[in-house]
Amino acid sequence: AAGVIQSPRHLIKEKRETATLKCYPIPRHDTVYWYQQGPGQDPQFLISFYEKMQSDKGSIPDRFSAQQFSDYHSELNMSSLELGDSALYFCASSLSSWGRHNSPLHFGNGTRLTVT
Amino acid sequence: AQSVTQLGSHVSVSEGALVLLRCNYSSSVPPYLFWYVQYPNQGLQLLLKYTTGATLVKGINGFEAEFKKSETSFHLTKPSAHMSDAAEYFCAVSLNRDDKIIFGKGTRLHILP
C-alpha cells in the first residue's frame, strides 16, 4: 500500500540558507501535518493543512512557511536556517471529516535536516 | 489544553517479561488516545488508538492499552516482550474536534536478553 512520501531523506544546509521539504500524502488523504523532532526529543507539532487551507498552527517559527497544493502535497519552506533547526521533520497525513479522527495519522519516514 | 505525561524516559524489561509503559493524560473533554512506536531511523507507526466504546484496545504486535477515565491513564502493555519490541514509544492525545495530536516525550523500551 502507498505510504506517505517525504523528500529528500537527508538534507545538509549551512546557516542562513533556505530549505524546502516536500511531503506527498497517502492518496485521498486531505489533511497534512508537519512535526519537528529534535535529537532525543518528542515530535513537536508545527502546522497542519486541511483541504489546502491552514487548519492549525503550532510552534512553527516565523522563518518557516508551508502550504498544501491542489494535489494535496505539502511543502515546508525554511529560511535563514539556524543550527537549532537541525532535526527530523515528519509529515503525516490523514483523512479527516468534521475534525474527527476517522483515520489515524500515517507518518512518512521523515527528512533529516542538518544545519552546519 | 490537552497534555500527555509518560512516566519513565527509559524502561528495560527482560525478553519474555511483561511490558508496561505508563501514560497519563490531561484533557478538558473526552479525548482520543493513541500509542505510536518509532523504530530507529523510521517514522512513527500507530500501535493502537482509543476513540469511544470498549476501554480495552488491542493493537498490533500483541500490544494493548486500557483507557481508565477515573485514573486519566492509558497504559500500554504486552504480556511477553520480544527483542524486536525495542523502540521508542509515544503516547498521544487529541480532542474530538481537533485534528492536532499532542505527543508525550516518549519512552525508550530496552529488551534485555
Image: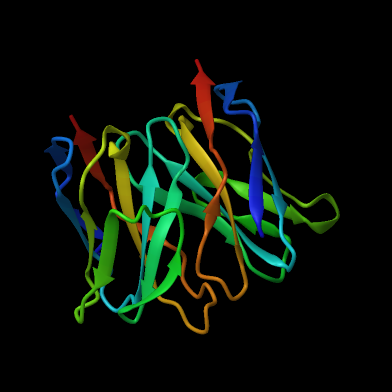
Q: Position of residue A22 (x, y in %)?
A: 19, 59
- Give above or below for B50 relative to B98: above
Residue A28 position within the rendered picture, expressed as x and y whole percent measured from the top left: 29, 79
Say which residue appears at 32% left-offset and 35% top-offset.
A84
Instruction: Give the residue drawn at x 22%, y 42%.
Output: A81
In the image, residue A41 sits, relative to residue A3, either above or below, namely above
> Toward the viewer: A65 or B39?
A65
Q: Is residue A32 left or right of residue A11?
A: right
Q: Is residue A25 visible?
A: no
Residue A103 visible: yes
Q: Quadrant of the N terminus of chain A?
A: bottom left
Image location of residue A31, percent across then percent down: 37, 73
Q: Residue at x 64, y 28 (%)?
A: B8
- Left or right of A12, for residue B81: right
Toward the right, the furthest residue is: B70
Establish if A62 lies above or below B108: below
Residue under the image location 50 percent in, 75 percent down: A102
A74 horizontally vs B57: left or right: left
